[in-house]
Structures are given as structure tokens and as C-alpha cells.
Amino acid sequence: MSDTFASRPRFAAVDWRRRLKRLRGSARAAPATLSFLALFWILGVVTSSLGTGPEGALEDWVTVSVGTAASNPAALVLCCFWAGGPGGYLGGTLLALVAGLPSERRLGTGRFLLAGLGGQIVGLVLATGFARLTSASIGDWSRALVSESFVGPLAFLAAAVAAASAQVGTLWRRRLRVTLFVLLILLALYGGNFSSLTVLGAAAAGALAGPYLAGRRPSLPRRLVTSRHEARVLVALIVLASAAGPVISALSSHAVGPLSVLRYLVTDVEVRTPAELAQLCAEESHARCVAAGIQLRAGPAAFFLATLPLVLLAVFSEGLRRGRRFAWLAALVLQGAMTVLAAIRVVRLLSGDDPPALTPGTGRYIAFLLPMAVPLAVLLLLAFTRRFFPVSAPAGTYRRLAGAVTLAAVVLAAVYLGAGLLNRNGFSPAATPGLLAADLPGRFLPVLEVSYTAPGLVPENLPAVLLYEGVGVVFWIFVCVLLLRSFLVPPYGPGTADADRAAMLLRTQGGSTMAWMTLWQGNNYWFSPSGNSYVAYRMDLGVALTVGEPVGPREELGRTVEGFAAFCTANGMTTCFYSVGQEVRESSERLGFSSLQVAEETMLSLDSLAFKGKKFQDVRTALNQARKHGITAQWIRYPSAPLAVKDQLYAISEEWVADKDMPEMGFTLGGLEELDDPEVRCLLALDKDGTVHAVTSWLPVYRDGAVAGWTLDFMRRRSSGFRLGMDFLIASAALSLRDEGYSFLSLSGAPLARAQGTSGHSGPREETAMDRFLDRLGATLEPVYGFRSLLAYKAKFAPEYVPLFMTYLDPASLPGIANALARAYVPDLSLGQGLLLARRLVDRQV
């Protein structure tokens, strides 16, 4: 087994025969979808509907509207076999191939048809009922709903896809439904037409019916449990969607939904032809006339500047996806400013200052109040998710960015003033230094309230128009590019320089099997006076919690323990040596520390390893079964792995997290972020198609300046993959690393678990209250994280058991230490999850 994929041809070449065979199998598994597509196009050709959609008497039979739904129930089913025009036929076909085929394979033909047709009927009934119920309260929107009709396969396919989502795993079900319903809700709120409401209702019906079709009752998730990375992605998607919604609304001249009024809060580009401009100038003030004329001339540039805050939010969403603190702060400030401006604008519009064409009554107030909920909700979301965005850029990154932005603004301003004077006759009136300077801010600011003031200059010829609208666009594109680049700069934390120094000492001096974890993000460092040793620790509420043992020469270990304890005392911190071995325990006990066992580490000696004999029967079974199923083990380094492999590892990890009632743990338990390290090795279980069934990661253990062994860290298995994948990978890793000449493996420690007879005490020892608390905590977390089961599982490899301890100076500090441990392992624990954990602990105590 090598450290590369280069020797595996299936990653470099495409097996077209296998793919063609799979495509044929997919076609046979989805007869209803293919039959529907054939009938869809045949009926379109026969009835001459491909160009303009159904017309005449056919339109009355196959289209559904609020007025015809009750009188023509057959149309509730027939409407999916026609479309409104060429775009509807092409889009429906593409959607059927992309979504219909896999949905039918998941559901089966009968349930696919039942979910699609049933959901379509329910969606039409819901949309029709909604339009009737709101006809007297929501003004223009309800009247538009009553006047529209629905035809096309979108509702059928949306319902089928939503129903099929119940058949996939937790992770992909959540992703599919979030994507589907965010899209449909946006279309309903910002477009607001009868079709979008119908499709949304059909999808909701399909999602509710999906569990029943799968043979189980539907249940709402008690909480959204996800990893830090997935939480960042979800927040970024919501921010991006909130930015895209008003743009979609502004692009549509027929948007009538309750949130379509946002187009009046974002842009004043309401005039599209000279005739409309003439009419506006005859009815409105001179300032409005001139402002509309400028927007009509400016074209795309005016729209870009009008939507500039939303463009910046879209840029910041990329930084949010990467966990950047600057992007979070900038998005929070911008969203707050947009919320305030929207509120001010709504007050002005409701007070009669040039309101949009909405009828009086309840509908007008609903249409204005609902848009306020969107920016406010996003603002609150950002405020409450601050902890997910701790990543900082290197010092000076944004100082240099501000300098570059200032220089660009100065240069472009000079270009505008200079070129404007050279082409002074290209403006009306003729440009002067004073007029150009007064107009300059408007070239860079978003088109909001500025457009209501009479402009001092109007461009007349092409060079003037390009200059007039170009400087602002060039400037903000330059700013967006710089911002995106800043999010790609390697992150920087307060301890980055210390981490580099610690990494050098670790490689030269060596450390324990947990030493590589001291280099993970979030750690602080204390260096010994000699400069040869260090202690990595987490600081929380006055407790200094070490990440394993000190790193450095073993002869300095006692002095390092004593020095770090003195450092903590001098700075008013509580010292806690966590997950340390017998030697550190004895050194700290000489200083008056107490101790208790908190974990059990399992070690494998590789010198004479051979999985022979009865005790290794399970291991040999895993190796033989893997060979039988065509599963092989492949070493990779995550940073250089193919993108397809990274995507699979991410999906496997998120699926594992999504199935838990508690969030992903950290501290001494690594996740995907810790895999992204060129010195960490990953072993994958792969089948012949390149599917990853399981993955393990291994951390290097340095001794005397070289890697002497490896520590198991990350373990994940695909829920539908090879059942013995983890046994196979651990056994394969042991044999492979033995052949490479390494002397030992650590199968890592199991927190809150211990084997019998490994307390580390020479005689009987009275169980303390903290021992009992940790025992109850381990039993409480066992159904979620399975630490004790993991320790029992590792017994099949016949390891050596090594106890790991926690040492502390003052028993009165134990509540603070327990709190620091909980926050270190589960930093994303919500209030509800904390209360649930506390209740389980109390129940076990009682």
C-alpha cells in the first residue's frame, strides 16, 4: 500500500462500459419516468403546444387556476403532461432526468407515481385554497394569484423528490430537503405566483408522505446536530439566499409575492423605455424624472450599484463558509445597516412618500412588514452563530487590503475627474471641477437614497457614459476580488508563531502518543525556561487544561511539570494535567496534586505482530471478507487527495454527526479539519468503483527526531458500506506500518472508559465522588458516543492497556475543571443539549 493514488488506474481513467451498463440499469429501474418523458413530448407535438403551450379548448382541460380547479378536477392530474412553452418543455425534461430517474429508483414505480400525482393534487388544492382565503386581505398579490394558471411537471417532480428524500441517509436527506425547500420558499416569497405556491405545496406534501411510503411514521428532528464545518456552510447558504432573493425579485417585472416589495427597498430602476420615462416625467417631480433618466442611461451599472450590498453579502458568504471572523463581522455590520435602512425606507413609504402601487388595507401592511423579517432574521442568525467563525487572517492582511482599496479609490477618482474635464462637453451641463467633485461620491455609493436627489451631471456621449458608470463598477469588483483573496490566505491565530515553535520541538525532542494533538488549533503554549520543552493547554474560565503530557526531553519532565504549575499559580489559573501517563502523574503528585483515571489507551507492538490464533479470528474474518468483496486499503494524504475522495469523506463524516443527538466532539478527538495536514496519514477502504466505505487517520509519534509509531484518531464508516470496514482498516494499517518498520501503534485513548485492573494504583483505592461522576457521565454519553463500546471493540486486537489520568491540585476546583472539560470536548453544546445531558445525569444518580 503506497501513499498515492497514481498506481490506481480507476482514478485516472473512466470505465465507459461500466457507466453505460449502469445507465441501462437505471433506465430499466425507472420505466415511469421514461414513459412520462415520451408522452410529454408526443402530446406536445400532437397538440402543437411546444411553442406556446396549450391553447383554446385544450387549455381549459389541462391547466388549473383558482376559478377552474373545482369545475375541472381532471386537470389536477393532466396538467403535468403539458408545459407552458419551449422553456417549460426543456426544463421539465432536464428535471425529470436529473431528479425523476433517481427518485423512481429510490421509491419504486408505484410509490413514485403515487407520491408525484398525489403531491401535485395536494399542492394545487393548497394553492387554490390559499388564493381564495386571502383574496380579501392581501390586495394585488391575491388578485394576481386568482388570474394565473398552472401547467407543467414541476409540482409532480418536486413532490416525488421530496418523498424520495425519506429513503436516503440523514445527512443527504437534510441537504436535499434544505436545498429544495429554500429554493421553493424563495421563489414563493419573491415571485409569489400561483405556480411557485403550487410547487411548494406539492413538495411539502411529498415530504410528509415520504416516511409513510418508506414504511415508517414521520417525525420531526428534535434538534439540528451538525459539525462546525457543516454549520458554517448552512449559515453561508442562508446569507447567500437572503442576498439572492431581492435580486431575483428586482429582475422579475411580474413578481407579486409578499417579499417582492424588497425591490423597492433595494433599487429604483423602475423605468425601462423612453416612453415610460416620458410618462414618469409628466407625473412626477423633476428630481425623480432626472434620476430615472440617469438610471435608464446607465443600464447594468446602475443595477450593479443598486444591488451592491447584496453582492457584498454574497462575497462574505464565501468567507463564512471558511469560518472567517472578518467575514462574520462584516456580514453582521452590513446586514444590520441594511435592516436599519429597510426600516427607515418602509416608514417613509407607509407615510406616503412616493409609495409603490399597492392597494390600501391589510395587504399593504403585510407586504411591507414581511420584508423586515428577512434581514432581521439573518441578522439574528449571524449574532447567535458567532462561535462558528473563529478563523483569523494573518496580522496585517486587512490593513494591506484597506490600503489597496484606498489607493484604488484615489486613482479611480483622479481618472474620473481628469477624464471628465477632458470630455467636459460630453456631459449636460458641461462638466466643471466643482460639478465633477460634487458628483464623485455618487459614482461609488450604492443607488439607494442618492437616486432621489437631482444629479448635477448627465452623461451625453458614449465616453461620458462609460466613465460615469464604469468607475464605480471597476472599484467594487476590485474590492470583491481582494476580499475573496483574503479568505484564501492561510488562517492565523494568536498562537501561530508558538505553534510553529512547538512543532519544531516536537519533531526534534519527541513526545507521547498524543503529542501531535498539541499542534491542533485552539491550543495555548507555555515553554520551559530551557526552551526544550513545552506544555499545550486550553484556557477556559480560569482553568488551564493540558492537552496530554508535556513535550520535550524525558529528563526535563519533572521540571516542566513543576514549572507549568508555578506559571499557572502565578497567573491565578487552576492547573489540570489531563490525559497524562504514570510518570507525569507521579511528578505532579510530588507537588501535592491528586489524580483520577479518565481514559484508557490501547497499544499494539508491531515488532512481532501476526494476526494468528483464535483470539484474532474476527480480524482475519474482516480481512478475508474485504478480499471477497473487492475492498482494498489505500493510504492517502488528505491535502493531496482527489476531490471526489474528499467529497466522500466529508459526506461520511457529516452523516455520522447527523445521526447523533449531541454535536461533534473536539479537544483530543479530531475531525475533518485535523485530517487536512500533510503529516497525517489516512487509510481508506475502497471498492472497485472507487467508493470509500470507511476511513481512519493516523497521527505521527516522534521519538529521537524520527517517526517511531502512529496514533489512531479519526474513524468513520459509511452507514451503507462494508460492515467490517473498521476492523479491516485497523488490521491493514497495523500490517502495513509493521512492514514499513514502525515499532508501535496506539489505538488512541477512550475517554470516560477503562478496563478492569488498570487504575494504576498499587493497592485498593477508595472511589471518590469525581470517580462516580465520571462513571455516570460515561454511561450517559455511551449511547451517543460509545466510548466504552469502542474500548471493548479494540479488545479484538489484543492490545496492551495503558491508563491515562487527570491530576489536579485542589478538590474544590473540580466543578470548574469539569465545566472546562465539557466546553473543551463539546464547544458547540447548545443550552437544550446541556439541559438534556444534565437531566440524564440526574436520572442516573437517582
Image (cartoon, rainbow, N blue to C red):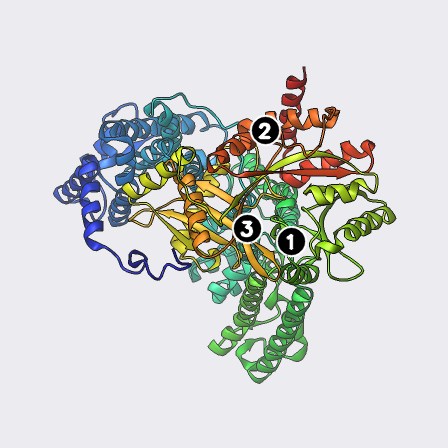
- The dot on residue 511 is 1
Name the quarter where the C terminus is drawn: top right
Residue 485 lies in what quarter of the image?
bottom right
Residue type of the residue flagged with mark 2: Leu
Q: How many marks?
A: 3
Q: Nearer the viewer, residue 360 or 484?
A: 484
Helix, strand, or loop for circle 3?
Answer: helix
Task: Determine which quarter of the picture holds residue 132.
Answer: top left
Q: What's the CA distance linking mark 3 and mark 1?
A: 22 Å
Is label 1 in a helix, a strand or a loop? loop
Extreme residue toward the left, this view: 46
Mark 3: which amino acid?
Glu
Real-space Cα distance between discs 2 and 1? 30 Å
Lower sequence index among marks 2 and 1: 1
Front residue (pair 287, 822): 822
The residue singled out by tag 3 in the image is 673
Q: Position of residue 547 (x, y in %)?
A: 68, 46
Residue named by callout 2: 781
* Mark closest to the chain's N terminus, 3 or 1: 1
Question: Alpha-carbon distance for marks 2 and 3?
Answer: 23 Å
* 338, 543: nearer the viewer: 543
Q: Residue at x 32, y 40 (%)?
A: 624
Q: Is residue 152 in view from this perspective? A: no
Whether residue 442 sits left or right of residue 819 in the image: it is left
Amino acid type, residue under disc 1 in the picture? Gly
Coordinates of residue 572 in the picture (x, y in percent): 85, 45
Which numbered disc, 3 or 1, marks the residue closer to the eye? 1
Residue 267 appears in which quarter of the rendering? Answer: bottom right
Q: 746 left or right of 29?
A: right
